[in-house]
Image (cartoon, coloured by chain):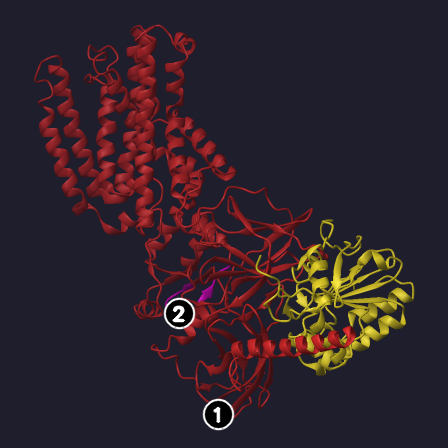
Amino acid sequence: MAASRGVLWHWIAAVLAALLLHAAASAQFPQPGKNAISASLIAETPEVAPGGSVTLALVMRPAKGWHGYWKNPGDSGIETQITWELPYGLTAGPIQYPVPGRLIVGGLMNYVYEGEYAQLIDVKVPADVAPGTALPLRATVDYLACTDEVCVPETAKVAVDLRAGVPGRATPSDTTFDRFRQALPKPLGSEGRFERAGNRFRLAVPLPAGVELAEPYFFPLTDGALAYAAGQTFSRSGDALIVETDAPSNATSIDTVEGVLKLSDGNGLWLKAVPGSVPAAGTAPATEGKQSSALRPAVLVALLGALLGGLLLNVMPCVFPILSLKALSLAKSGGDERTARREAIAYTAGAVLICLALGAILLGLRAGGSAAGWAFQLQDPRVILVLLLLVTGIALNLAGLFELPALDVGGKLARRSGSQGAFWTGALAAFVATPCTGPFMGAALGAALVLPTAAALAIFAGLGLGLALPFLALGFIPALRRRLPEPGPWMARLRRILSIPMFLTALALAWILGRQAGVNGMALGLAAATVLALALWWVGHRQGQLSSWLPLAPAALAAAAALILLPLAANPPATTSARTALASEPFTEARLAQLQDERRPVFVYFTADWCVTCKVNEKGALERAQVAEAFATRKVAVLVGDWTRGDAAIGRFLEKHGRSGVPLYLYYAPGQPAEILPQVLTPSRLVSMVS
Amino acid sequence: MKEMLAAFAAVAVLAVPATAVPAVGRSAPNFKLADANGKPVMLSDFRGRTVVLEWNNPGCPFVQKHYESGNMQKAQAAAARDGAVWLSINSGAPGKQGHMSGAEAKAFVAKAGARPTAYLLDPRGVVGKAYEAKTTPHMYIINKAGTLVYAGGIDDKPTRNASDINGARNHVLAALAEMKAGKGVSVATSRPYGCAVKYGDS
């Protein structure tokens, strides 16, 4: 009895289960004859030239709650398989998949598409197909459609009819394929490095430090390299993005790892990595506008460089006199510890603040799209004029023509204007120092420009601090101060001697002014300097009287007049020649054609924020003064295409030139076909190219 | 009814030693699961015999590919001929596709003409997760010394078409043959393919 009861229970349970399973299934499954993911095939152009190719899109539309799979489906699932039936020897290329998404179900990772997605396939047409031939393309597509609960392998028959002929130019209104292409990962162009440390998988991807990331994720195409469901941590070490995650438990040896690095939604980079050493994890990347607080090693190196550079500036002809005089006045203040410290701090504050301010303005200009470089303020002849007058004034002061409270060695006002004077002396030193900064600080400041704002500003501050360091040391170390020689008549002599480098600086500034604003501009500047010198001479004569500064009024007027007249006096070609960055405009094919019609030589380059090679070339070659000069002399127009977000028009243009990514450098001499330049540029190559 | 109760009771006292990951070449983690009859089965019961583990979900089209074509049953018969133990394991959580009671499991085995040594129920997914079973089917082979010697797919044609079975390399049969011949397993890991194991959401 008991046995038969058991059998009965089996029966009931089995029937119930079958019914339940069936009910559950039919509730979820799409209607018979209708796929959960519908597939259709469309072509970019209805006609394709014999010998050419056409891009097809396999457009997949999952029903709500269903998803399709990436090429690497993750822990389970399968990739799309297409069996083609193509006439006349047409051949279909591999499926190009858009950047996928992630879906974790029951602890298993799925790399999926949950909304509509398009897989692109390039089809080549042999040259011997006669124009006008009908080209019926047929394919059977096998793919897996899943919900969180069930998976259904689906099959779809798709078709598209083309015709051999002259391909119509892609109509501007048809942005469908542009949208599809934009969803594809862009080739990064540089190789990554990966290593396995214990049961961890580590990957270094070359990526400029400034690239913004929002929920980055590395989708591996290579199976067995990393554990799919394990969390990934991202950090930055200079121009490398470090990905760390678990290796799979049954790891096999792998010689390359391919995959797609998602930077932010819909923006991914295809890359390949080879075995190699991966730098130690750096700082957490700034994602979604959040700045990292810790400083990474690369920043520290740049900071150190800035500090040393600042220190070096102290012996520059433009700074040394200011510093030494300040030091002497400090020595004179004798044993007063507090005054010395206060002045040292005020001087440092002045120097650091001016450097920070210059840096901030520079970064602001950069963010605003201007191609400004360090010492950008020197690109304006009016700033040079102000500097010229300032330096002339200082030189005349040193020469003993007149006395100035802040720089007064033996003056009565030194005590009263103590910290304030020191602050402005520091500020002056920093401002005057910038012309000397360029050649020494180019590299460090170049690095600063591609770093996040906070880090870049830290480097500018470091420059100021380095500049102020000797004075800071004097202020805080009495022993050092005691080593300064006793004040005496020799100081006046030294002051006269120090006026010589200052006069030389003025000479150099006059020369720069001449380069920028031409002979007229230089004459104007020198005239203003002469008026100033005369006025100061007069001041010196009346020194000590209440109205002793009155004679400066006509000098100020003269300077103001010169400032207004200078832009008029300047001759434009000379003005552009001193710029360190190339004047450029955004790339469009129409603009390129227009410039070519005008028979202008055109230099076109394509770049992206995430492209290290591009940035290196821009810093190391394109933004060099000699290149700018050569381009300006030859009136070379510069067009820049920014492919950071994968602009489709640029993508097509790149493809036309046999490139799948950036950088691409092209030079169009008037009436000549485009010359493709190597991927690594040198200033001399660019200069010889245009001359 | 008594059987089902017993099955649930056995499931409730399941224990898998947490011996880290099931790496090929290392000792396979022991486990204890209730079979379709509610009888507890331990891996260590089979020490000294070759053991094949097969993750199963009768609702999965990829499992159906190998059962409806008779491919899986053929492999089970071959394993049995060599004296190997075959354990089919179902890690589907209650309410998910493929989850079965003991009775349902027995009905499935009978209907499919399958020949596993035992059909084990793992509704909490404890053993599945310990072995990092990801798909159905997902296959493992443990040698007589208790060492994991194979982990991966059943063959090298990751499709749903039964017509692909001919011409595919059946990794499990190949490994069993190599072991029988006293050779090492030449393909010790491969990529498993199929549906995801329907684990609970815990």
Q: Which secondary structure, mark 1? A: loop
Q: Chain of mark 2?
A: A
- Magenta extent: A667-678
Q: Residue under circle 2?
A: A649
Residue type, numbered disc 1: Pro
Colour used to depict chain A in the structure image: red
**Residue ranking furthest to the right:** B181
Please name the residue shown 84% across and 58% down the image. Answer: B45
**Residue ranking furthest to the front:** A1
Looking at the picture, do discs 1 and 2 lie on one chain?
A: yes
**Mark 1–mark 2 CB contact (< 8 Å):** no
Q: Which secondary structure, mark 2? A: helix
Q: A62 or B73, which lies in front?
A: B73
Q: Which quadrant would the C terminus of chain A be assigned to in this image?
A: bottom left
Q: Is residue B67 magenta?
A: no
Q: Of discs 1 and 2, which sits in the foreground?
A: 2
Q: Badge 1, how many Cα within 10 Å: few under 14, some, many 20+?
A: some
Residue A81 visible (yes or no) = no
Colour used to depict chain B in the structure image: yellow
Whole-percent x, y for residue B55 in the image: 71, 67
Q: Chain of mark 1?
A: A
Q: Residue under circle 1?
A: A131
